[in-house]
Image: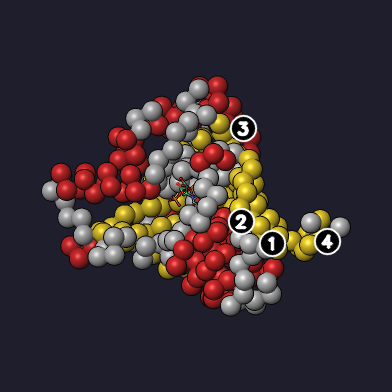
Amino acid sequence: MQKLRSITVRAPAKVNMQLTVGGRRNDGYHELANVFLAVSCFDEITLTPADRLHLTVSGRGTAQVPIDDSNLAAQAVKLLAKKGGVDPGVHIHIDKRIPIQGGMGGGSADAAAALVGCNALWNLGLDRPGLLSLAAELGSDVPFAVLGGAALGTGRGERLIPLTGSGALHWVFAIAPFGLSTPEVYGAEERRRRQAGLPSTADLMPSPKASQRLLDAFARGDVGALAQTLSNDLEPVALSLRPKLAATLATGKDAGALAGMLCGTGATTAFLVPDARGAQRVADALLASGTCASVQIAHGPVPGPSPEETTATG
Ligand code: ATP
């Protein structure tokens, strides 16, 4: 039996501690001020040389994950192979733990892991800036998924300034029994702005800015102050699309969360809690309430994906 070198990469999910949505640009993207935090909820990607590019999935919600060329991890492999001038023959296996359509950047995490993993598998030697520029071609959230830790993203979220925090932040994520698609949420926000007579294009709106209070609280590790500065501009419109999320938010806050918010474009909700014990209390209350399908306790920041070599038998 032949031994194949394979690479396994853990890909962390993200939560947006701030998501401020500015105007829509000519290319259709919105200007953002996006404070990302990578958290300890991981997909695991295994990459094994194969005679052709193919993909399998196990774990959570596998039916909703495409296994064709539209999977972001497959797109990442193809892009890197083209850039490196190598054959893209690889078997990508994704063990899914990050909620699908949850606003936690699962597809972007898988794409980042595939880039970092195949860079190692094929000994391409691409450096961090090289990987980040390929990541930006794949999607707005993919560069942060390569970087990990914490960062301020501007532009459409791809221009990153890494942030240094102080200590671990504890979170509980309530996974909804339904998803929310990113285009659906941005589309509804556009309609809301139009109906309210608000400007909606980037040329008519100021560039969104990071909250200095949030950045300071994060740098100091002042969880109480941080909780008061968390914000997500898309939460009201997501609540109008999925009104049941209001009960989830109320349950987490009543159970002692310092803050509760929509995670990215949803439909996961995120609760910042003071410590690990508080996390368990909030998680128990959320589960008992029946206002969500499942819960996940996590901490952040955690580092971005890094490849680990394993040997598979083929
Ligand atoms: P976003 O980055 O848009 O906020 P999300 O975190 O809300 O995304 P994802 O789980 O990343 O949601 O998936 C959004 C959609 O992307 C899915 O419905 C699916 O059709 C598609 N998709 C492509 N590749 C993947 C992947 N590797 N994992 C999950 N979904 C993927």
Q: Secondary structure at mark 2?
A: strand
215 or 285, which lies in front?
285
Going by the numbered disc 2, the residue's amino acid type is His
Q: Looking at this rendering, what residue extends furthest in the left direction? A: 197
Chain-order first, disc 2 or disc 4:
4
Label 4 Cα crowd, 10 Å radius (few <14 / some 14-19 / many 20+): few
Residue under circle 1? 50
| Element marked by disc 1 | loop
Q: Which residue is mark 2?
A: 54
Secondary structure under badge 3?
helix
| First of labels 3, 4 by sequence position | 4
Judging depth in this view, the residue of 206 and 75 nearest the camera is 75
Measured in 3D between alpha carbons, the distance from the residue under mark 3 to the one under mark 4, in whole angstroms, is 43 Å
- Residue kind at label 4, given as amino acid type: Lys
Front position among marks 3 and 2: 2
Furthest residue toward front: 51
Point 52% across, 52% down: residue: 68
